Image: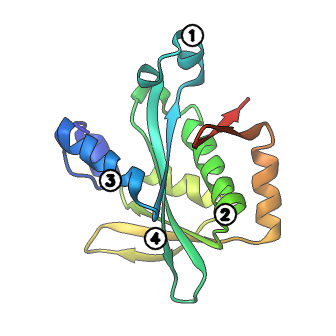
Amino acid sequence: MKSPELQQLTASEPLSLEEEYEMQSSWLMDEDKCTFIILEKSAFENTGDEIGAMIGDTNLFFFQSEDCMKLAEAEIMIAENSARRKRRGWEAMLLMLRYGCEELAIEKFQAKISCVNEKSILMFQKMGFVKISESAVFKEVTLEKCVNETWRHWLMAETQGSQYIQTGEEEDIKSE
């Protein structure tokens, strides 16, 4: 990731292409992570080129919380400027949260977001997350959402045009 703006918003370090590939390879084998690559639907439908249609990713990192609930830290990045402010991040994050609830039995989600990334903070708050802490040292806020039936129903309603499709060993989520 070469964009200084994205590095600041995602608290990321610049990586070489080789380092990016190494990181992706390690994530593939790590059972404590789940990653969805976000494609621009129209670009993929027009070209069939997954690489060219890539606009970002969303991730879950799993661990046990202090209250023994199955917890996942959620992250989202829309890397392509042309894909921002079109609700792609909103849709992808909702689908990842739904997948986490339905398929991975996540009971609580957290999002750690740079204090300067106001759009991302607002997006998670609109999804029902609440601020539980702020770190001056890391310059980030932590938002949290406990899963309950009311929220599950809301997630289902927000993603009702989507379905899981098993393709080989991978699962795809299609959205209309």
User: In the image, 101: left or right of 35?
Assistant: right
Q: Which of pointers 2 and 1 lies earlier in the amino acid sequence? A: 1
Q: What distance separates the C-alpha of mark 2 from that of mark 4?
A: 13 Å
Please, what is the three-letter code of the amino acid marked with disc 4?
Answer: Thr
Residue position marked by numbered label 1 in the rendering: 46
Q: In this orientation, which residue lies closer to the viewer: 107 or 123?
A: 107
User: In the image, 173: left or right of 158?
Assistant: left
User: In the image, 69: left or right of 162?
Assistant: left
Mark 2 against mark 1, which lies toward the viewer?
1
Q: Dot 2: what SS? A: loop
Residue 76: x and y in percent read: 47, 49
Q: In this orientation, which residue lies closer to the viewer: 113 or 51?
A: 51
Q: Residue furthest front?
A: 168
| Residue 43, placed above or below residue 3 | above
Asked if disc 2 and disc 4 are in contact, CB closer than 8 Å, the reply is no
Q: What distance separates the C-alpha of mark 2 from that of mark 1?
A: 35 Å
Residue position marked by numbered label 4 in the rendering: 142
Please, what is the three-letter code of the amino acid marked with disc 3?
Answer: Ser
Q: Which of pointers 3 and 1 lies earlier in the amino acid sequence? A: 3
Identify the residue shown where x is 70% and y is 70%.
147
Residue position marked by numbered label 2 in the rendering: 128
